[in-house]
Image: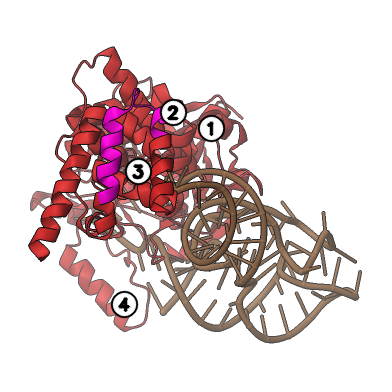
Amino acid sequence: MGQVRVRFAPSPTGYLHVGGARTALFNYLFAQQNKGKFVLRIEDTDLARSTEQSVDGILEGMTFLGLEWDEGPTQGGEHGPYFQSQRLDLYQQHADQLVASGRAYHCFCTPEELDEMRKIATSKKQDPKYDGRCRHLTEEKRQAHLQAGRKGILRFKTHSDGATVVNDLIRGKVTFENKQLDDFVIWKSDGMPTYNFAVVVDDALMQISHIIRGEDHLSNTPKQIQIYKALGFQVPEFAHIPMILGPDKSRLSKRHGATSVTQFRDEGYLRQAMVNYLALLGWSYDDAQTLFTYDDLVEKFSLSKVSKNPAVFDIKKLQWMNGVYIREMDLDHLYQIVLPLWQNAGFLAADPKESEVNRAKLILGELQSRGKLLTEFEESAYYFYKDQLEYNEKVVRKVLYKEQAIEILTLLLSQMLKVDDFTQTDLEPIFTEAQQKFECKLGDIIQPIRVAVTGTNVSPGIYEVLMLIGRAKSCQRIKDAVEMAKAHFNEVK
RNA sequence: GCCCCCAUCGUCUAGCGGCCUAGGACACCGCCCUUUCACGGCGAAGGCACCGGUUCAAAUCCGGUUGGGGGUACCA
C-alpha cells in the first residue's frame, strides 16, 4: 500500500455539525496513525446553497477540534485547488474523456419530461429510473438541440449487467446489482459537475487511498466505482461509518438542538471532551476505557473497531465528559480559558493585577468541581464579583424569612466584625458557638449566611465563600439581609 | 415501490460458538461522605427485537419477520 491519503469533503451549505466533525475526526485519526496525509476539500458545486460563510464556519469548527489538515483551502498543497468550484477544467477534461470514449452522452430531456417519466414508471410499478431515451440520439438531433440553444446535460452510461461489489472496510463486501442503476447525471445544465462525478475525479486526482465517510454515501458508491473504472482510475478503499441520530432516532438535525461544533464551543464545551465523545460515537476500544487523550486516540483508533449501527447523540454523556475534563485540567490552564469569559462579564479587568489573578484562581478552584460547562462559571462566580446580589426569592423566603434567621445573622454579624482574621480558623468557632447557642444543626447556621452572602442556597463551602468575598462585603450583605428580613416581617404585619 | 445497511440495558457500547446466571460508561434510583451544591465512594434496577433452523452447546452462525437508518435528484 502506498501512502495513506484521506480527505474530509464537506459541502459548505451549513456549519460543521457533529456528524461531519466525527467523520473528519476519524479521517484525521486514521491519517495520523498511518503517518499519512489529511486533505480538506470543499465541495461547493451546489451554486445555490454554498456560502463563503459556511466555509469559514467549517474551518473554524475544524480548528476548534484541532483537526489540522495537511492540504486544503488555507494552505493549499500539491493536489489543489481544494475548492471544487476552482477545479472545473479538471472535471471538464474528464467529462470530455467519457464522452469521447462513449461512456457519457448528452441528454436534452427537460425536468418536466423526467418528472412525467418517473410518474408513469411509478404508476406502472416500475422503478423510477431514467429510461435512457437520449442514449441513442443521432448526431443531427444532438446538433439540432444545441443549435436551438438547449444546453442539455451529460449522463453517464452505466453498465447494467452484472454487479458492483463495494469492499467496505467496516461492512465487508456489499453487492449491488448494476441493473438497479440508471444513467445518472454527471454534468448539470448550470455548467457544474454533479457530486457523484466530481467526487471521483477529485479523489482520484488527489490520490486518496481511503475514503472514510458517512453511511449515507454507501448506496452511491457503486455509481462512483463505475466512474472510476470508466476513467481508468484505481478504485480506493472504502469505509462507511454509521450515521449519528437524534434522540428520536431520526437523523441528527437542527431541530434536535445544538449540532454545530462552534455552537458547542460557545456553550462551554472543551475541545478534549468534544473529541473524546465524538470518537466514542461509533467507535470503542475495549470494555473498560472511555477517556482518551488525542495521542491515545491516534494510537488506538482502528476502522475495524468502528461499529456498524447508527448512534444516538447523547448530550448528557458529553456533559459528563466535559465535567471530567474540567476537573482534570490544572487550575492555571482552566484560568486561561475562563479568563476571557470573566473579562467579558466584567468580573476581571483586561489586564488584571496579580492579586486579582490569584483571587480569581482561588474562586475558580472552588468552582472547578461544580461545573460541567465553562459558561456555568459565569453565573456561579458572579456573587464574588458583582456588588448587587440577585436574590433567589424562593430560597430567601424559605431560609431568610424566619425569626430565628434574623437572630442568627445578627449574632454572626457582630462576631464577624470582631474577629481578628477573616479566615476559617477564626470564623469556624463563631459558627459552632452559634450552633450550640441555638441548639440546632450547623447547617441551620450556615444556610442563612450562605443565602445572605450569595443570594442563593448553592455555593462552595461557606468559609471559602466568606474569605473570598471578604469581610467588608460579607458583613454588608449580612446587614442587608437582616434589613430585608425585618422589612418583610413589618410588611406582613 | 425498489435497492443497500443495521439490530445487546433508556443512551454509547464490550462480546467475534462454551470463559455470559451478558461486562463497562452515561443517565436514573438508593445509601455513604457532608455545611448547601457539586465532587468522591458504595449499591440497586435495567438489555441479547421476534420466529425458525445449524450445533452436544448460540447474544455470537444461517434464513425469515418486524423495526430503524440510508439511497433511489440537473443536493452533497
Looking at the image, is mark 4 or mark 3 earlier in the sequence? 4
- Main secondary structure along the magenta-highlighted residues: helix
Query: Can residue A86 be seen?
Result: no
Q: Nearer the viewer, mark 2 or mark 1?
A: 2
Q: Earlier in the sequence, mark 2 or mark 4?
A: 4
The answer to whether residue A22 is left or right of residue A130 is right
Q: Secondary structure at mark 1?
A: loop
For the C terminus of chain A, the image quarter is bottom left
Chain letter for mark 1 = A
Q: Which residue is mark 2?
A: A425
Alpha carbon distance from label 2 to label 1: 41 Å
Could you give the CA–CA distance between mark 1 and mark 3, rounded to whole angstroms? 31 Å
Q: Residue at x 53, y 32 (%)?
A: A293
Q: Is residue A93 rendered magenta in the image?
A: no
Label 3 and label 2: CA atoms lie apart by 20 Å
Check the image and report above or below for A319 versus A74. Answer: below
* Element marked by disc 2: helix
Q: Which residues are the magenta region?
A: A407-428
